[in-house]
Amino acid sequence: MITLYVDRQRWEGHLQHHLATHPGLVPVAKGNGYGFGIEALAAKANELGVDTIAVGTYDEVVKADGFHGDVLVLTPWRPFELRATYDERVVHTVGRIEDLRDLAVKAERPRVVLERMTSMRRHGFSARGLREAGEAIGGDDGGVRVDGVAFHLPMGHGSHLTEVDRMMTDVIAAELPTKRVYVSHLTDNELAMVRATWRDYEIRPRIGTNLWLGDRAALSVKATVLDVHEVERGDVFGYRGRSAPKHGYVVIVSGGTSHGIGLEAPNSNTSLKDRAATVARGGLDAAGFVRSPFTIDGKQRLFAEPPHMQASMLFVPAGAHVPEVGDEIDVRVRFTATSFDRTILR
């Protein structure tokens, strides 16, 4: 099994602290639910007492059925979206004037958040488009209830304050029937400064990673050892008939591609250190050795061959302490790309 262990007291303390220091918090529960699952996060959001959560897609609205409040869908509504639900508590994101008009016809006064395009350039209205939306909502093409405006900002690109101030000016110019603004990826200092500058507006932070995964020391991941085989140099093993490079052990552990093990998301490689690490990994790949995320006897061990669907084969040289069948070993994972067999709060 791949097991996520959670220090309940520490994790819940972190959640409560985040709630207290981020007024208007909208927890984000999307994708794999940051490793916990959307259903579990929806239940936890009820305990936190928030009135709104955000999911990524319309498919995820059903998974958040256990939440008692409103569900904001982050992916913009489109006319071809067959999975959309128009429940009273569902809030739709809209980023194009034609979608705003089509949605008004599709449902009876649906609730919407108007997304303003940011420097991320993913979805949203331009400044001019937002003014057009304001005119449409104020005229015969209205038919929607505006719950707010949204700014989905990029991460790690310096201060966002100048961009936010410019977009807030656009919101004012659009004369929208709302004083609520949802923001993503503002630092705590930026959030405080935006609130101080725009006191007439309700600024609501949408937070996922920093909320659920913000205290990594509260979380640990373990893989179960399924089998251990001693091998000599030249012994053949695995799907691909590889041979052992020297005396050691092939250790089979839980966790494979179906869990997200061995799957790595692209990164920006912005620093010299990052690029050097990429070159080093490439050298290992070329030699037939790839470092795994599994730790045995204090070291990250090499994959003996590419991970299987639900298990991985590791090579551990003789002389290292080898775990026994049934033991658990540490494994480093990307929480947003990993499926766990079980989660244990303790």
Image (cartoon, rainbow, N blue to C red):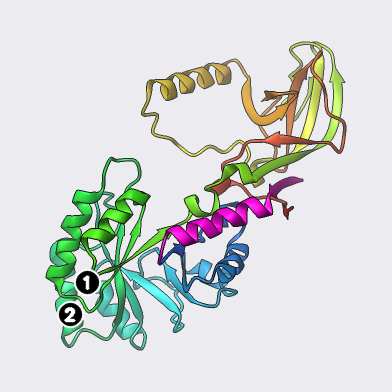
Magenta residues, as a range? Answer: 1-23
Residue neighbourhood size for the residue with mark 1, other residues' Cα within 10 Å, grouped as few (<14), some (14–19), many (≥20): some
Q: Disc 1 or disc 2, which is closer to the eye?
A: 2
- Left or right of 209 in this view: 144: left
- Left or right of 244 in this view: 286: left
Residue at point 83% right, 24% down?
322
Looking at this view, is 211 or 252 the one in front? 211
The amino acid type of the residue labelled 1 equals Ile
Residue at point 44% right, 84% down?
88
Q: Which residue is mark 1?
A: 97
69 magenta-colored = no
- Left or right of 231 in this view: 150: left
- Whether residue 55 is visible, yes or no, is no
Q: Is there a contact, CB below 8 Å, between mark 1 and mark 2? A: yes
Q: Which residue is mark 2?
A: 136
Residue 74 in the image, given as x and y percentages of width and height: 40, 64
